[in-house]
Amino acid sequence: MARKALGPATLEIVQAVRGHATGAMVAAVSGGADSLALAHAVAHVGAERDLPYAAVTVDHGLQDGSAERAATVAEQLRAMGYSDVVIERVEVAPAGRPAGPEGDARAARYAVLDAAAAARGADLVLGHTLDDQAETVLLGLLRGSGSRSLAGMAVRSGRRLRPLLWLRRDRTRTACAELGLQVWDDPHNSDPRFTRSRIRARLLPLLADELGPGIPEALARTADLARADADLLDRLAGDLYARVLIPSEVANSPQDRDPRATERSAELPGVLGSSGVLGSSGGLGSSKDRDSSADAGRIAGADPDADAARRPGQPALSCAPLADADAALRTRVIKRWLTDGGAAEVPYAHVRAVEALITDWHGQQEVQVRGIAVRRIAGELRVVGKSGL
Ligand SMILES: Nc1ncnc2c1ncn2[C@@H]1O[C@H](COP(=O)(O)OP(=O)(O)OP(=O)(O)O)[C@@H](O)[C@H]1O
């Protein structure tokens, strides 16, 4: 690698990598300005510290000429001093899957990038910048997400390292100009069909025009604060989950059921016919023609049908301690339990409907979540089968 004086933007990026490099590194390089500037810095720091370094570029095969582009990126990397350069061709699943082609491409990309880093015992070094972080936070806000989503990306997450997360994107472009690197601009990044592209190209510039500079930095700060909160809450929720989870052997044994629920349901014959929230068979109203005494028996665990419908090997959740818990922890526990139980994705409304079985219990029927059906039986939440949702 040529050893001439580094330009100011290049030096900033090298400093960022110096600040986080602890061992072998694999740079993930798309050929855009962020990852090319990053790749240069990884090679620079690897050489000066005698750390092994490699680079991977992923060809998703989604655009014409993608193979040639990947070959060009590989050439640029070798010219920077890389001897270990890998072009990974990935198959992206057909459109129509829940994540869509973008999500599929991302999942396939991360799978090969993570594997390349793991095979070398290296950190996977990614070129996300502060602007990417700001866009992520805005996307989360606009979707009505919780603090985990607002938390965006961490500089380090396992083997994944994002040393440029506190640098503005224009610095990487300037660095590439300083280095004489030819940058590839992904047409997807400016394609107005993608929400992220519109946020990048229109919304953030509009916010800067209307509110002045510093918005991306403020959003990145929001991510940092939200991440600290989300980490704490996730840890506390993990502890609570361990306390309220009833292993499947116990959950499936009728004699271990909470007798208080039996008493309670016996006191509530008049409301036990209420229809399950979000159930495919009904809305929120009560179905008057149901046999409330049969429901009372089912909730008390005396109905053999309820036993037959229960999924074997599925742990239950104890309702009483969850009723006393803070909502932030309760909803996290519910979401995790539903996901562990086989729910594909859990929309907020479904978490709230399951939560109502704990906090607003009046004998509801089963709640249908994505992929599974949940009921409260004898003071426990149980997965009782698959849902049609
Ligand atoms: N085709 C690719 N090959 C190798 N690395 C890539 C590729 N595309 C993206 N990367 C890596 O991921 C970083 C972020 O790129 P980009 O924002 O396009 O991807 P992303 O991972 O989908 O990000 P996000 O999670 O923000 O959507 C790049 O700087 C680069 O390090």
Image (spheres, grey):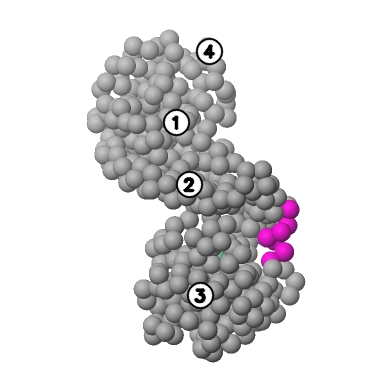
Asked if the magenta segment contains residue 332, the reply would be no
How far apart are the alpha carbons under marks 4 and 1? 24 Å
Residue placed under numbered mark 2 in the picture? 222
Q: Earlier in the sequence, mark 4 or mark 3?
A: 3
Give the number of the mark in front: 1 or 3.
3
Type of amino acid at the residue the image marks with label 2 = Thr
Give the number of the mark in front: 4 or 3.
3
Q: Would you call the spot at circle 1 few (<14 residues within 10 Å), some (14-19), or many (20 or more)?
A: many
Element class at badge 4: loop
Q: Which mark is residue 11?
A: 3
User: Visible in this render: residue 98?
Assistant: no
How far apart are the alpha carbons under marks 2 and 3? 27 Å
Q: Would you call the spot at circle 2 few (<14 residues within 10 Å), some (14-19), or many (20 or more)?
A: some
Type of amino acid at the residue the image marks with label 3 = Leu
Q: Quadrant of ligand 1?
A: bottom right
Q: Which mark is residue 21?
A: none
Q: Residue 197 location in percent, x, y?
A: 68, 54
How far apart are the alpha carbons under marks 1 and 3? 53 Å
Q: Which residues are magenta?
A: 186-192
Residue 267: name its quadrant. Answer: top left
Asked if the magenta segment contains residue 188, the reply would be yes
State whether label 4 is within 8 Å of ligand 1.
Answer: no
Q: Earlier in the sequence, mark 1 or mark 3?
A: 3
Type of amino acid at the residue the image marks with label 1 = Val
Q: Earlier in the sequence, mark 1 or mark 2?
A: 2
Identified at 48% across, 41% down, the residue is: 146
Residue placed under numbered mark 1 in the picture? 354
How far apart are the alpha carbons under marks 4 and 3? 75 Å
Give the number of the mark in front: 4 or 1.
1
Q: Residue 229 location in percent, x, y?
A: 38, 44
Q: Residue 48 location in percent, x, y?
A: 42, 84
Q: Which mark is residue 289?
A: 4
